[in-house]
Amino acid sequence: MNNPAEAFVARVGGKALAFLEELGSLTWLAGNTAAEIGDRVAERRPPFRLADFFFQTARVGVGSLPMVILLSVFVGLTMALLTGYQLQKFGVTTLVPPVVGIAFTREMGPLFTGIVLASRIGAAFTAELGAMIAGGEVDALEAMGIGPLRYLVTPRWLAIFCMTPCLAVLSTLSGICGGAFISDLMLQLGYSFFFDQVMLNLMVKDILAGVFKSFVFGALIGLISCYKGLGVKGGAVGVGVATTSSVVTAVSSVIAFDSVINIFLVLLFP
Amino acid sequence: MKNRAFLEINGLKLKYGDKAVLDGVTLKIEPREVLVVMGLSGGGKTTLLNLLLRLMEPTSGTIMFRGEELLSLERRELNRARTRIGMVFQNAALISSMTVAENLALPLRELSDKTPKEIDKAIDEKLELVDLKDAREKLPGELSGGMKKRVGLARALMLDPELVLFDEPSAGLDPIATERIDDLILELKEEHNVTSIVVTHEMESAFAVASRMAFLDKGKIIFDGTPDEIKGTDNKVIQKFLAPYLAHERTGELHHANS
């Protein structure tokens, strides 16, 4: 392996193999969780406890709400302000409301929600499942005949899957409100004009695109964070490594999938 | 079916590459037996227990439990079989975010049709058995090592298993807590007809509870017999392993005779 080109190809090949392995393991986790749920349903037992699901939804939804709203208001405010100052040169500040409205509905709302949830909730899921692995608690669940994937992954995954679109909608509304506030204050665009323009220019496909994306982001963050947590090796250090990796992977995946979905949506629904 | 052993392990092997962790373990366990498995650290004792519950998959071999081949069971049947086997983990492995009562309720809540009232009653019964009624609402972090082990045992008994596996039940415990655990193992056998496999390093505990003993060395069973037989074995590894305990026992007997 003295040839640098050969070494480069080997390194790239190694990385590609590792990526495919991770992808295979993620699919294995999703498949086996579904199979364990199937076993429970066949036994006419609920696949998870509603109390566990509601506990997780409160944590994901209510718990993340202040951060999502705060972040969205400030981003909406900054976006309206900077766009407004540029558009002022051309005398078309009236374009600020549709720009902010469409950008937040299709893009910023779901994306910021995804990033906040990947770092706040994804990290928490990975750390707690990782600590359970390190403490032998997952083995204990399995030894008792309680499917640990069904028991641990299902309520968490379902909670983040359901809560991401809800939070994305609230993030969108907050961003638009932030934009309306600064537009009224500095761009001489009144609230009623701002909201009217948003409503006039928003199309159903923009709203559906945003909601669809947030479901995908929720599913991705839930799966990646649980996978990273259940794959912890090496005690406390392992939990730290997995948590970092979980946040990095989930945030990167959210951004990458956002781009891919945008390309498809623009091509399919121009 | 009648001639079949309660638990029969045949040629169980687990290999990682060239390294054999277990190299053809064969054991038979009869009902109400307390089989103590001893061996040097890293000899594969805990691995053996993990394989019995299929927390790990062996390279080859068979495990017949009550006439059922555990290694060929599908997930659903395997989970059903696991409810008949209780495991007391070395570190107790209690769910740290749940109270003692919630830990004990978990298997019943998830796997039985019992009502909350019946589950509550079962928790009280098991906590009374392990003498920990006052710990009901405590979190695992508030318990001592011995208490955690006893709660671990209570949880393992919640589904009334026929076989209980103990992984180092007295490791790190004081003599009084150790004696309490030993008494519980014997009580399970005498009063609840439970069969046990105990993996331990503690010689006094081993001889206090064992009805049979096996010695695992480098992945192989090099002795399988009664506690009296192991004391008279001519195997050098076992002699060396037992020497401190036997010397201590002889000193005790001598002291007793003199006084």
Image (cartoon, coloured by chain):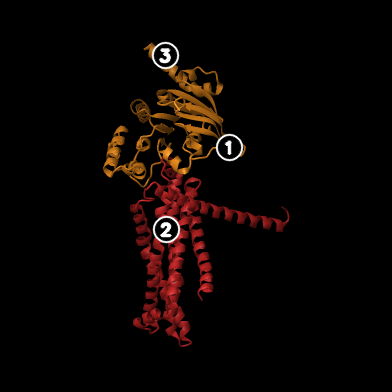
Chain colours: A red, B orange
Q: Which residue is mark 2?
A: A121
**Residue lying at the far top of the rendered structure:** B258
- Give x and y (percent) for residue B8: 49, 29
Q: Nearer the viewer, mark 1 or mark 3?
A: 1
Tell me whether the residue at label 1 lies in contact with that at label 3, contact meaning CB atoms closer than 8 angstroms: no
Does residue B115 sit above or below B194 in this rendering?
below
Q: Quadrant of residue A184?
A: bottom left
Task: Say yes or no: labels 2 and 1 on the same chain.
Answer: no
Front residue of this view, candidates A199 and A121 = A199
Mark number, residue B254:
3
Above or below residue A247? Residue B121 is above
CB under 8 Å between callouts 3 and 2? no
Determine the chain carrying the residue at label 3.
B
Left/right placement of residue A188 relative to residue A233 reads left
Q: Which residue is pictured at 46% across the width and 37% down the height?
A: B53
Any part of residue A108 in sight: no
What's the mark number on residue A156?
A: none
Chain under numbered label 2: A
- Between the residue at mark 3 and the residue at mark 2, the CA separation in whole angstroms equals 65 Å
Q: Amino acid at mark 1?
A: Lys
Q: Nearer the viewer, residue B182 or B224?
A: B224
- Asked whether, in this view, residue B114 is left or right of residue A143, the answer is left
Of the image marks 1 and 3, the number of the one nearer the N terminus: 1
Provide residue B23's location: percent of width, then percent of height. 57, 32
Write down the residue under mark 1. B15
Amino acid residing under circle 3? Leu
Dot 3 lies on which element?
A: helix
Of labels 2 and 1, the one closer to you: 1
- The part of the image, by quadrant, that contains residue A73 is bottom left
